[in-house]
Amino acid sequence: MKTWKKVIGLSTAVVLLGALTACGGGKGKTEGSSKKADENTLMMYQIGDKPDNYDALMETANKKIEEKTGVKLNIQYIGWGDYEKKMSVIVSSGENYDIAFADNYVPNAQKGAYADLTELAPKFAKDAYDQLDEAYIKGNLVDGKLYAFPVNGNVYSQQVLTFNKQYLDKYKLSIDNIKSYKDAENVLKTFHEKEPNIAAFAIGQGFKAQGDFDFPIGNGYPFAVDLNGDPKKIVNQYENKDFMDVLKTMHKWYQAGYIPSDAATSNTEFPLEGNTWFVRQETQGPYDYGDTILSNAAGQELVSKAFTTPLKSSDQARMANFVVSNTSKNKEKAVEVLGQINSDPELLNGLVWGIEGEAWEKIPGKEGKIKLLDGYKPNTHLPAWNTGNNKILYTQDTITDDMIKERDESIAKAETSPILGFNFVTSNVKTEMSNIANVMSQYLDGLNTGTVDPEETVPKLKEALVNAGYEKVLAEMQKQYDEFLKK
C-alpha cells in the first residue's frame, strides 16, 4: 500500500525498531564497564517516529537479539522531514554508526559511504538472504556489488484506482469493467453530479499520472522505458502517445470538476478513513492481499481496480533498504543483526504486531495465524512493509490459505523491468541534470493534475528541455543503458 502523497519516495511513516534506553553509566558502574556496554551496542539511524511503547517493544526485542548475536541495538530516530538532510551531513562527515535506513542509496554507495555486503550478506545473514527474490539482489547492485540488505516485501507493485465503497453502494455504481483512467470516467461523472462538494478524484501537488513505464532516475524526470514498446530504448515519456492521452484525460476531468481546482498547489490531505473522497490512486503489491491491508488502514471497506502491469522494478527493490556504514567497526555483527531481524519469526512478529498477549494472540491449532486484541493500537507496533521479511510474518485469520497461494503465484508471474539494476552515472552531465530538474519542477504538477492543457503545454516543456540539455543527457543515458544491457 502506498498513497500518491509520497514522503521521501515512500508511502507511510517508517520505523524498524524502537530505540534502546541508555546503556552503561548506571549507578555503581565504572567508566570501563560503560565503555564495554557501548561496544556491545550497535547504533542504527531510522526514519520516522518512535513508537509510544518503544521501551516495552525493545526490551523484548533486544533480549532476543542479544541472545542470538551478542549485541543490542540503539536506534536513533530522525523525522521524515529532516532525514535526508541529516543523513547527508552524517555521511559526508564520516560519523561512526553501524546501520541506517538507506537514503540516496545509489549515489552514497558509489561514494563509498556503505559497506560492501556482497560476501557479508550471504555469510552472516544467510537464512534471510536466501529468502530474497532475485529482483532484490539485482535491483540493488551498484557497479556489480551489493551495498544494501532489503526488506523482503512487495517485490512488485502496480497502480490501482481505489474507490470508497460507501459511495459505490450509496449510488449503486459498478466498477467491474474499469481497467484504465478513461474507463472510470462514467462513475466519476455520476458521483460528481450527486456529490459536487466531495473530491471525485482526490489528488494534489506531487501526484503523478501513471502508465506502463519504468524510469531510470524516477518519474520526476522525463526519461522512461515504455514497457509496451522497445525495452532497449529510453524515451521521453511526455512524447509518448499513450501518456499524452492520459494527460488529456486528466485535463478533461479537471475541466469537468472531478479534480480539485487547486490540485497543482494543494497539500490537502484526503484521509483513507474519511468520506472526503471518492477515488484515489494507490500502489499495491502482493503482501497487501488485494485491498485487505488498505481497508484495514482505512477502517472501512475500499475496492481497487488495477490499471498498470505488475512490475518488479529498481524502485520496488530499493523501497526499504538497510545499509551498513563503511565507518562501522562492527560490520559483520551489523549484518548478523539484520539477518536475525529478517529470519526470526518470534522477534519480527513481536515488532510488527506489537506485544503478544496485549495486541495479539496466536490462534490455537492454526499455525502462523493470529487474532488482534483490543490492545492493538496505532503507534504501538511497526509497519510490516519495511520492518522485516514479510514472508515470516504471522497473518490474521482473515487471510486465507488461498490468498497466500495467490500472493506467491503473483510474485512468480510478475514482470521484471528491463532496467532493473540499471544505475545512471550523472558525473558527465551534472549541469544538464540540474537544468532539467528545474524545468520539470515548473511543469510536472500542472500537467499531471490536469490543470493545464497538455496539447498547449507539452510542446513548451519539450522546448525547455532541449534548451536545458536534454539531448546530451539522453545520449549519455542511452550509451550507459546499452552497456548495461550487454552485460
Image: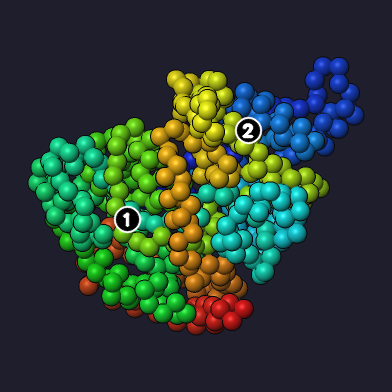
Specify few, some or many for label 2: CA neighbours under 10 Å numbering under 14, 14-19, or 20 or more.
some
- The amino acid type of the residue labelled 2 equals Glu
Left or right placement of residue 64 versus residue 134 in this view: right
Residue at 86% x, 32% y: name it: 36
Give SS at disc 2. Answer: helix
**Which residue occupies the foreground of this view, 449 or 210?**
210
Q: Would you identify the image quadrant in which residue 390 lies?
A: top right
The Cα atoms of the two marked residues, 1 and 2, are separated by 34 Å
**Which residue occupies the foreground of this view, 13 or 395?**
395
Return the disc, 1 or 2, that comes first in the chain's sequence.
1
Placement of 137 over or under 327, stated as above or below? below
**Which residue occupies the foreground of this view, 169 or 480?**
169
Colouring: rainbow
Q: Would you identify the image quadrant in which residue 165 lies?
A: top left
Placement of 289 over or under 245, stated as above or below? above
The residue furthest front is 365
Residue at 74% x, 45% y: name it: 336
Residue 302 at x, y = what percent? 29, 41
Q: Tell me the quadrant of the picture where the C terminus can be found.
A: bottom right
Is residue 437 among the parts visible in the rendering? no
Mark 1 vs mark 2: in front: 2
Left or right placement of residue 196 versus residue 224 in this view: left
Q: Would you identify the image quadrant in which residue 37 lies?
A: top right
The residue furthest left is 193
Residue 370 at x, y = what percent? 50, 29
Residue 226 at x, y = what percent? 39, 73
- The amino acid type of the residue labelled 1 equals Ala
Residue at 66% x, 30% y: name it: 61
Q: Which residue is mark 2?
A: 346
Q: Which residue is mark 1?
A: 306
Give SS at disc 1. Answer: strand
Q: Which mark is residue 168?
A: none
